[in-house]
Each structure stands twice: as structure tokens, then as C-alpha cells.
Image (cartoon, grey):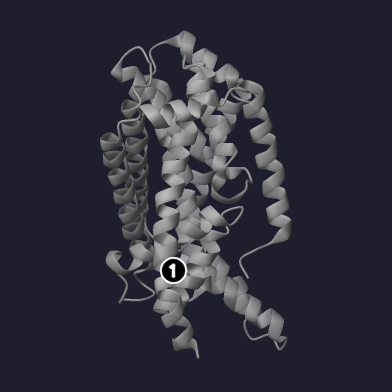
């Protein structure tokens, strides 16, 4: 149900392209072992605690979007479902885990998957807006014009990439802000087909209507602002993890302030690269753009690759294992309940 061979092949092609590009930048992978050996794992554990805290805040955000659908939901019972969703994302291509998370929520809590998919869509948009805002603020704070220009030159498309990011921010902001004002029009259109005699058309309209019920769960400006603030906090916590990992390996940069700016840029650009298709877990796009950022700010290619892979593994490994354990623990009772 969750696996799609076409998506898998598309993701594989994109990931292959990014990995070949990484190999072209640095054909020496010794930096990966070097980073793993020199890391201060006490700081790594502190960093991981920030990441898991960000997952709890993600669960709080999802509960905020789902609250009108099921009063029995709360951050505590949604957190395991979010973790399982991340596990599926890490094992299935092109963020198929988001769909799996909605099916899993329906099985466990009875929330319609179509409604949940709508809330996931608004989550992703708020993520892009928040990351773009963080990126824009960081670019403003960079006070070394030479390095800033070098960073922009290394981005695919050069100056056009920066323009594209600004345009993307504007586009998604417009969609997010206009969402509450489009609901009545969507409902009018769906009502025209709701009572159609064709069962396929009728069910499709019902599915779309439920999807937009979830998508339009934010229906006023104050709720919209709150959603953006929550998303901003989520990414701030996750990027804090990246910073602790950088400190744990003593990433060589001029000063701590410059290290912070570099890691923020790394975190925002690498995660915004998630808009590109990739294999399970985002391997390829995250690593390629992350390495580009670090190299542009003076970190050598081998160490850049080592650090980025180390960060990616810390994002991928623990949550995948924990999510798999939670899912296996729940799956047998769910199957019994179904029967």
C-alpha cells in the first residue's frame, strides 16, 4: 500500500545523481570514520535530546491541527505515531512515511486518513515557510560578504537559487495565508458533486472534502501565526542538535558565532533540499547540499562529508530503531483488533 515502484525509481535516480556529485566533490571518504572516532558522544547525546524534543513539539503541532477531529488526541498519544511515521519515512522513498503515518493514525485513533493527510500537507508548508524564514534571517546576519558570495556561487544556479528561495517563501506564505479564505469556495465546488450517482466520483469528492477539512484546520490569522511559531521552534531545536554535533567534533571555523551561522545555513539548506525526490531517509539531497554549504565556508571536503553523514545517521538511525520497535509492539494488537 505504501510502496510505489515508480517513486522508488525516481528517488533512486535523484539520490544517485546527488551521490555522484558528492563523489565528484570529494572522493575521499576517510572523513566519515574520522568524525565518528573523534566525536564527543556526551555532546552527541545532548544533541539527540534536542532532536527528540523537536519530535515532541512536532506531535504538539499535529495535535493542534487535529484537535477539531478527535478530542481524545493529545501530544502524548500522538508522539509514538509521529515517531513511527519518521521510521517509515526513513525506510520508504519520497516521504511515503507521511502517508503511512496517516493510515497508522486511523488504525490506532480512528481519525480519517484523508483528514490527517490534509493536516500533514499544512505541516509541510509551514516547515518550508519556517526554514525559509530562518534562511533569510541568517543570510542577513552574515557579516562577511566574501564568504556569503562564495556560498551563493556554490549553490546550483548561482544567484538564481537565492531568488528561487525568496520566490518559494513568497509562494508558500501566500498559500498558507490564503487557506482560511478559500474554504467556502472549495465546499461549494465539492457540494456540486457530493450527491453524484457514480460511486467513484462520490467517494473521491468525499475524500477531497475531508482532505481540505484537515488542510483548512487553521482558519484564522492568530492560529496561522501560532502554527508558524511552533514550526519555527521545531526547526530551531533540530538545528541545535546539528550545532552540538559540530561542537562534538570540533568543526574548524573561525569563531563560535560564525559556527552558529554556518550550521544554521547548513540545516536550512539541507532540509529545504528535501523538496527533491530521493531514496528512503532523504539520503543524497540532504548530504549533497549540506556538503556544499560547509565547503563554501572553508571546511575541507573530507571533513564536510564526514560531518554531514554523521548528522544524517544521527537523524536516521535512532528514530528508525525506536519507530520500528513501537510499530512492532502495536502491530499485533492492531491486527487482532481488525480481525
Image point (50%, 16%), residue name: 300
Could you say where residue 276 lies in the image, as x and y percent from the top left?
62, 42
- Judge by depth and name the residue closer to the eye, 96 or 143: 96
How packed mark 1 is, by other alpha carbons closer than 10 Å (few <14, some 14-19, many 20 or more), is many
Please say if 191 is above or below 223. Answer: below
Image point (63%, 46%), residue name: 278
Q: Is residue 24 visible?
A: yes
Viewed as shown, does residue 29 lie left or right of 4? left
As drawn, which residue projects farthest toward the bottom?
339
Q: Is residue 218 visible?
A: no
Q: How many labels, in total?
A: 1
Could you say where residue 139 lies in the image, as x and y percent from the top left?
43, 23
Please say if 166 is above or below 315. Answer: above
Element class at badge 1:
helix
Please say if 193 is above or below 240. Answer: below
Quadrant (top left/top right/bottom left/bottom right) for the N terminus: bottom right
- Judge by depth and name the residue closer to the eye, 101 or 233: 101
As drawn, which residue projects farthest toward the top?
146
Could you say where residue 145 lies in the image, as x and y percent from the top left?
45, 10
Quadrant of res 283: top right
Viewed as shown, does residue 88 lie left or right of 230? right
Quadrant of res 80: bottom left
Q: Which residue is mark 1?
A: 327
Could you say where residue 334 lies in the image, as x and y percent from the top left?
44, 81
Image point (39%, 17%), residue name: 142
Amino acid at each position: 500500500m505504501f510502496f510505489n515502484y515508480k517513486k522508488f525509481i525516481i528517488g533512486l535516480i535523484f539520490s544517485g545523481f546527488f551521490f555522484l556529485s558528492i563523489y565528484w566533490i570529494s572522493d575521499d571518504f576517510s572523513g566519515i570514520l574520522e568524525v565518528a572516532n573523534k566525536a564527543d558522544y556526551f555532546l552527541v547525546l545532548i544533541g539527540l535530546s534536542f532532536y527528540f524534543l523537536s519530535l515532541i513539539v512536532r506531535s504538539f503541532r499535529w495535535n493542534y491541527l487535529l484537535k477539531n477531529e478527535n478530542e481524545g488526541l493529545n501530544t502524548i498519544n500522538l508522539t509514538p505515531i509521529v515517531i513511527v511515521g519518521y521510521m517509515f519515512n526513513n525506510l520508504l522513498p519520497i516521504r511515503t512515511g507521511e502517508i503511512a503515518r496517516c493510515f497508522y493514525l486511523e488504525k490506532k485513533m480512528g481519525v480519517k486518513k484523508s483528514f490527517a493527510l490534509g493536516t500533514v500537507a499544512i505541516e509541510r508548508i509551514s516547515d518550508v515557510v519556517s526554514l525559509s524564514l530562518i534562511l533569510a534571517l541568517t543570510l542577513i546576519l552574515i557579516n562577511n560578504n566574501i564568504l556569503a558570495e562564495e556560498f551563493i556561487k556554490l549553490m546550483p544556479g548561482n544567484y538564481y537559487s537565492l531568488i528561487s528561495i525568496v520566490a518559494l517563501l513568497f509562494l508558500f506564505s501566500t498559500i498558507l495565508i490564503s487557506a482560511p479564505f478559500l474554504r467556502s469556495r472549495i465546499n461549494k465546488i465539492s457540494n456540486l458533486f457530493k450527491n453524484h450517482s457514480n460511486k467513484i466520483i462520490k467517494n473521491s469528492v468525499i475524500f477531497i472534502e475531508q482532505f481540505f477539512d484537515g488542510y483548512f484546520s487553521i482558519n484564522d490569522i492568530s492560529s496561522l501565526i501560532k502554527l508558524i511559531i511552533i514550526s519555527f521552534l521545531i526547526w530551531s531545536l533540530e538545528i541545535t542538535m546539528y550545532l552540538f554535533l559540530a561542537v562534538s567534533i570540533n568543526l574548524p571555523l573561525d569563531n563560535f558565532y560564525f559556527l552558529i551561522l554556518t550550521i544554521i545555513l547548513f540545516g536550512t539548506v539541507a532540509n529545504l533540499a528535501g523538496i527533491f525526490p530521493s531514496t528512503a531517509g532523504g539520503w543524497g539531497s540532504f548530504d549533497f547540499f549540506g556538503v556544499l554549504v560547509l565547503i563554501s565556508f572553508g571546511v575541507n571536503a573530507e571533513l564536510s562529508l564526514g560531518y554531514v553523514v554523521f548528522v544524517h545517521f544521527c537523524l536516521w538511525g535512532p528514530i528508525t530503531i525506536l519507530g520500528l520497535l513501537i510499530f512492532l509492539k502495536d502491530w499485533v494488537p492492531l491486527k487482532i483488533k481488525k480481525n
